[in-house]
Amino acid sequence: MRPTLWRKAPTMFKENTAHKQLAWISNVNDLPEKQRKRLEESWAGVFYREFFCRIDERVFAVLYADIPSRPNIAVNVLVGLEALKAGFGWSDEELHDAFLFDVQVRYALGYHQLGDGEFDVRTIYNFRQRVVEHQKKTGENLIEKAFEQITDEQVKAYQLKTGKLRMDSTQIASNICKTTRLRLLVEVLQRTHRMLDEEDQKRYAETLAPYLKGKAGQYAYRVKAGESGAHLERIGEQMHKLVTELADKYGDEHDYQILKRVFEEHFALGAESGLRPKEGQELSASSLQSPDDEQASYRRKCGEDHIGYVSNLTETCDPENDLQLILKVQVEPNTTDDAKMLAEVLPELKERTDVDVMHTDGGYSSEEVDELLVELEVDQVQTAIKGAKPDPDTVGLEKFDWEIENKGKPKRVTCPNGVQTQVITGRRRERYLAYFSLEECKSCPFADKCPAEPLRRRPKRALRFSKQQLNVARRRQRSAQAKASGKNLRSAVESTVRSVKHPFRNGKVPVRGQPRVRMLLIGSAAMSNVRRIHRYLKNKNNSKSQEISQNSLSDDPVFHFLSRCSHSFSTLVAFSAPRAADQALAI
């Protein structure tokens, strides 16, 4: 382990309330009244009131020392800067310049005077590092916690209905370059060499010498076509040697753990076959894609290769809401299934909101999701259903009407011909039966297509089904009803996804690692909410202004006189137009 040469001085937590006390003299107050009003009504004013002032700084107190020491830089300013960076797609240098010199940015962060609150850009780096380290130790993402607390307050302030929610996922590329397998392995060997102390570097100088000439990409470039297999075998032998011999001394080092992981992912060691490189199809999609981003994974979707993460966004979608807000941002390796993310977030959403209908696409379905939806009493409406389409020559369970008890247990069923019967529990777990009389089924036009089978020894037909089959049938019913209504409440979430990804070129974020990617996307979602609220308030103010102007004009006698004159002139023109046309024809 390398010795620590210096230690950061402790910093104690102190809330920032200075922005609540306005100065008599400031750059903002020096602005003309018209410009000052425009600043207050701009996005900066909305950001200050609806985001900055709602930040609960006490959540971040765990990042600082609990002993008397120098106070921290204002947490709400640092959190606000993270949101602005993500929402505008700024680099850290652009972010710092905007904080120092942009009046709107400073106003959004509670500063009315240039020069107030100035700090070095490294303060932002240290704050991020504290947040990431806290998440690694406790699993708690403080930025996410702050975003959800702020959003819940916004929902309450604007009295938004949260009974209907929608979600969608999207691919997010990490800030790593696409690399070949050979280049990745050489890069890991080079980092292993840098990990070694001076004595071990001399010891393994001959072993690692071929891989230290230039960068990893240059090594891969020099390999001729058809020779990569031999190079992989040699690299595998060297890695096996290093993994075995360095375990005792460097086992706790991060670079050694990367070496071991890559070796196990790319090489197979058998008692008879010996050491061999794994074939392409043997490699896991979750295998390491870059030493700089351990969580990033590989996925091929819609014919395209994706390396990085998947983000799942949840927002309100009740038609009665005047605006919709993003409530939740999830970021997982892109091999994560949509249904798994829904199952993970649904209990939290049920606790935070009044959700009883969830609008999704066809990817958000599984047995686990169905059971959770029943338990939490939430209906799922999908735009499509995974799996084979129902046979048009048969009558599926989705054609039956179901009476459901608590916990999703079926009580009664009505067939397409209108015959109703009781549902009983089958012998096996989560299996059910419903009996129909043969007399009632004789005249049924669906008898040949009905899934209920005639019994040999009893004058009845038995409908046998499982709990999962019933869940799928009910999902098909809700999907069909939604299509018949002509309203697709889920489709607009795709524009939400676009708004969150828009600041990042080609959907590639300028950071690496799951914690930083999540922080960035949460900040972008927060700015999307601020822009929506700004647009809503602007439209509302414009409507009020028009209404006031119309009311004031209606009481003005001059307006009435001009209106009568205009009406008389229009009548005269309308009366004379046909006569003028007749004269033209006569000529």
Image (tube, rainbow, N blue to C red):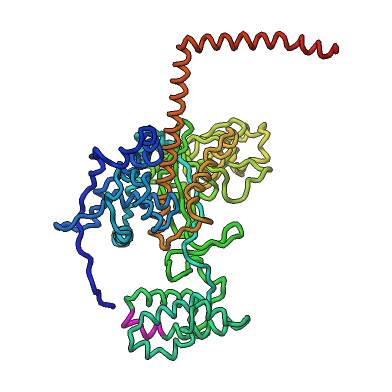
Using the image, determine if residue 462 lies above or below residue 224: above
**Which one is in front, 30 or 59?**
30
The image quadrant of residue 548 is top left
| Image height of 26 relative to 334, above or below | above
Q: Which residues are magenta?
A: 242-250
Identify which residue is drawn at 37% across, 54% down: 97
Q: Is residue 326 above or below residue 202?
A: above
The image position of residue 411, as x and y in percent, is: 47, 36
The quadrant in which the N terminus is found is bottom left
Coordinates of residue 127 in the picture (x, y in percent): 30, 58
Tell me if residue 324 is in the magenta stretch: no
Whether residue 576 sits left or right of residue 284 in the image: it is: right
> Which residue is nearer to you in this view: 521 or 424?
521
* Residue 430: percent from left, percent from top: 47, 48
Q: Nearer the viewer, residue 248 or 403?
A: 248
Q: Using residue 211 as the reference point, say whether residue 583 is left or right of it.
A: right
